[in-house]
Image (spheres, rainbow, N blue to C red):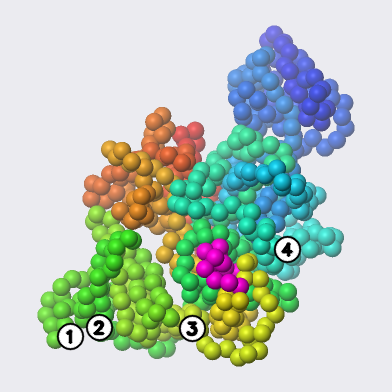
Amino acid sequence: MAAWDLSVSVEELGPDAPPLKISVTSDLHIGGVILKVVEKSQIKQDWSDHALWWEQKQQWLLKPSWTLDKCGIHADARLCLTPQHKPLRLLLPSGVTLRLRACFSSPVFRCVTGLCKLLNIRRPEELSLLWPVEEKKKKKDKDVEEELYDITRAPLPSSIIPKLANGMPAFFAETPETEAVYKMLAVSQPAPAPETIAKLYRSTNITEKAHINSRWLDSSRSLLQQGVKENDKLLLRFKYYTFHDISPQADAVRLTQLYEQARWAILLEEIECTEEEMMVFAALQYHIGKVSLTEQFVASCPAMDDLDSALQCLEVKMEGESSADDMLVSSMIYTQPKRLTLKGYKQYWFTFKDTTISYFKSKEESCKEPIQQMNLKGCEVAPDVSVAGQKFCIRLLIPGPEGMNEVYLRCEHEQQYSRWMAACRLASKGKTLADSSFSSEVQSIQSFLAMQKTTPSTNAAQTDESINTHSLVSPRYQKKYKPKQLTPRILEAYQNVAQLSLTDAIQKFLQIWQALPDFGLSYIVVRFKGCRKDEVLGIANNRLIRIDLSVGDVVKTWRYNTMRQWNVNWDIKQVAIEFDGNVNIAFSCVTADCKIVHEYIGGYIFMSTRSREQSNTLNEELFHKLTGGHEAL
């Protein structure tokens, strides 16, 4: 075969150095090319992490046995010999920025797995990387140097990382500085100054929230393929809101970072909550801040099976007592409410049997045929409560052939609400009132209601050290109340949580966050086929929601378990989904690439395939089959 010259630039020689020219033949393999380049460079160092990057095609040449001919490389190709692991600035949910080595050659999914392994965060499939919001600098703003914690000396994520008995990766224990960095990851940090919080990006409407989701990186392509350069800044965030197999003993960093992401979502008003809920959130933050200074993160219970048991007040199964099979309570109902209209309630007599609610005109007619029956299996249950206003409502989204039907139940008092709410939650999981966990579910709900009660506190509590209300409540309540009005209210709520351990307080915070109506919704602005106006698609862990952009009403809901198939037409950038009952929808994405929607849907379906039996193995191939684009196939 005829020999020809191939130009290869070497990163170690500097950006201004001319490319090295080596004589090759088309049957020379990639490994041989690297060997020739290394010999010609005359640099003696460890080259094991280096690989060839093909600039014109924007792809890595990672198969050393492939020949130049097989790769399609000719004399006009511009190749670069560069390290696969490069420094990256990584901003964590807690606001800590680390400088570490990340893999620029493997798909982002595997890169995140490596980063999480390095930081001792289990379940890396729940997280991903996204670009930060571009900061608009004003002329008067001085360049403040970002506080950066350098851990580039840590072992490469692809290698085996030994751990100490407490789960901390061994390299963090090498110096007092690195040990302090790990403590910052595993323990909640004090809130920054109000001026710093004021500068943080805050989305003011649903369209701005949708724009945030356009910044996620593609999980099936590498960092370098997506334009990420050495020392660029990326955010590491929880992307999929299905937190599997949480164990406080093994998940110190994971739980702390999850708490920080939830906390900032509330403070920056990314998710809405009521005034009472905000005071409870503020009290829990205040308590966690105080306890974090003295208490170490320890497990508060021996084992937790799944998200429900972890975050629903550590629900304990009791073999002994079980409640009655029937529950008859009068209540009021309202169906299909709109966000901008008043809810009109009518009083009916309700019965709850197995997983079904039936309602009648009156108690006397309960022996006849019911007006309607609603099976709650697979439904969504959310609280709509104001303890101060004596409002105890249950919001139900019940699956129907045309999507989800929204129903509100209004209970007369706290005790009735606790029992009905517990029954609805169990029924949504396919459990009946006879289930042994019913009484513990009731107690969990009652303890949460107790937190929202404002009890007259002692003078000692009122004169507690001045608390920084700006770091505990969202801007809406800072404008509505003065600090001297907020402080006593937060301290009143604090009396109800002051006895909780650090672990229990964080889990209680996450439990209340997960009970918020808009929890776990990721928004994308789309245009449905046949429509002339833009609408919003809300993507949750088990359903898709169509939202009217102008008024914010939920128009339709489709559940994943009724989905038969979904396709993406990559040429016209359109997503088409088919559901049971010959229901077909199609839409194009306005604020994000359709790959992001495709990845969200496939990712959530992938999350639902996980089980405790295979808790330590991650089926990366299945993830890419469900989320990859046409190039993955």
User: 53 above or below 20?
Assistant: below
Determine whether, in the image, residue 179 is placed left or right of residue 219. Answer: right
Crowd tier of the residue under label 3, counting other residues whose Cα lies within 10 Å: few below 14, some 14–19, many 20 or above: some
Circle on res. 453 = 3
Determine the CA span between mark 2 and mark 3: 25 Å
Query: Which residue is the site of mark 1?
Result: 363
Span highlighted in magenta in the image = 472-483
**Amino acid type, mark 2:** Ser
Determine the CA span between mark 3 and mark 1: 32 Å
First in residue order: circle 3 vs circle 1: 1
First in residue order: circle 3 vs circle 4: 4
Q: Nearer the viewer, mark 2 or mark 4?
A: 2
Q: Nearer the viewer, mark 3 or mark 4?
A: 3
Query: Which residue is the site of mark 2?
Result: 330
- The reply to whether dot 3 and dot 1 touch (C-beta < 8 Å) is no
Query: Which residue is the site of mark 4?
Result: 184
Q: Which of the 4 quarters of the picture holds residue 105?
A: top right
Q: Position of residue 408 (x, y in %)?
A: 30, 70
Determine the CA span between mark 3 and mark 4: 33 Å
Q: Nearer the viewer, mark 3 or mark 1?
A: 3
Q: Position of residue 87 (x, y in %)?
A: 74, 43
Secondary-structure class at tag 1: loop
- The reply to whether dot 1 and dot 2 touch (C-beta < 8 Å) is yes
Q: Is residue 163 visible?
A: no
Quarter of the image with the N terminus in it: top right
**Amino acid type, mark 1:** Lys
First in residue order: circle 2 vs circle 3: 2
